[in-house]
Image (cartoon, helix red, strand yellow):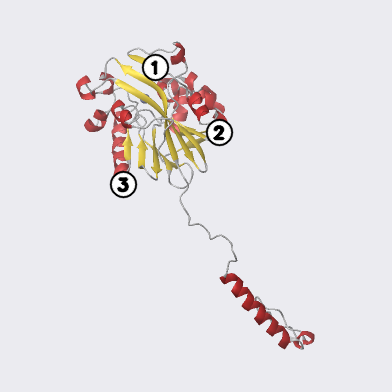
Amino acid sequence: MTPTIVPGSQPTSPSRRHHRGPLLAVLAVLSTMLVACAERPQGLPEEPPAEPAPLRLSILHCGELVLADPAPFNITTEEAGRLDMVVPCYLIEHPDGTLLWDLGLPFGVQTGEYKMQGAELRLERTVEEQLAERGLTPADIDYVAMSHLHFDHCGQANAFAGSHHLIQRAEHSAGFGEDGAAVAFFERQHYEALADSETTLLDGRHDVFGDGRVVIHPAPGHTPGHQVLFVDLEETGPVVLSGDLYHFAANRELQRAPVFNFDQEQTIASMQAVEQLLADTGAELWIQHDAGQAEERRWFPDSYR
Ligand SMILES: [Zn+2]
């Protein structure tokens, strides 16, 4: 006869059936002991409640830019209020990795080799010098993402060719492809080293660490693949880093795009999409170049959590 096997039980053979009574008694005692053990953890620490891991954002000093005339930005001096702009970069430290958002004015600004007509440029300290203060080197930066490839957002990119580059496909083909020269203000020498970097070509939204806290959103128009960054900070609340969606607060109030933008219509659509993102998430928009907002911020070595 073939015994029926029930999951979790043993087949009973005629020879073992003889001992069944005492065996059951022993099992009953053992199971009582096991239940007692399970009820009393015997000094083991209790499992801590699951807490969200820390996320930190630091604003690095990546230069200043003083305009002679705000007309290219489609606003008057009166509307702009002031003609100085700040150039920040952002270090995002997530438990699963580090991301640098934007890479500032070119190194040549420090030495006086890089100049721009119609604006005065200043760069006191490089990104690398500031990272060193926190004990970090470019090798510690897992990801770099730039809002776009204009000189004031990619100026120090070549120092981070070892990081994983996150860029919209349209920006990459404009910046690295043969048609790149057609886009105003793309100067390949600032980011040339990233041509061979490990790269993810994005086609829209990208959740950098997979937990919804650091998310790239497409906002094309200023350049073919311009993008903004949503960062969900626990204490500060969610923020969106604007890239150059807006340069001055007045551009946002008046919904006016710079005259030199790659695509005006696309820019206005991106402004509306980002305004919707802000409404949906309750995020605060940080206009990166806005000097008035910059005065209210806590800059590196301070940080936001
Ligand atoms: Zn800019």
Residue under pointer 2: 140
Q: Amino acid at mark 3?
A: Asp
**In this view, which residue lies farthest toward the front?**
43
SS label for mark 1: strand
Q: Amino acid at mark 1?
A: Arg
Query: How many C-alpha atoms fall within 10 Å of the one at disc 3: few (<14), some, or many (≥20)?
Result: few
Residue shown at the point (43%, 18%) measured from the top left: 124
For the residues labelled 2 and 1, the Cα–Cα distance comes to 27 Å
SS label for mark 3: helix
Residue under pointer 1: 122
Which marked residue is nearer to the observer: mark 1 or mark 3? 1
Residue 56, compared with residue 42, is above or below; it is above
Q: Nearer the viewer, residue 198 or 49?
A: 49
For the residues labelled 3 and 2, the Cα–Cα distance comes to 33 Å
Question: Where's ligand 1: which quadrant?
Answer: top left
The response on whether ligand 1 sits within 8 Å of label 2 is no
> Does the image show residue 246?
no
Instruction: Please report contact status of discs 2 and 1: CB closer than 8 Å, yes or no.
Output: no
Q: Which mark is residue 280?
A: 3
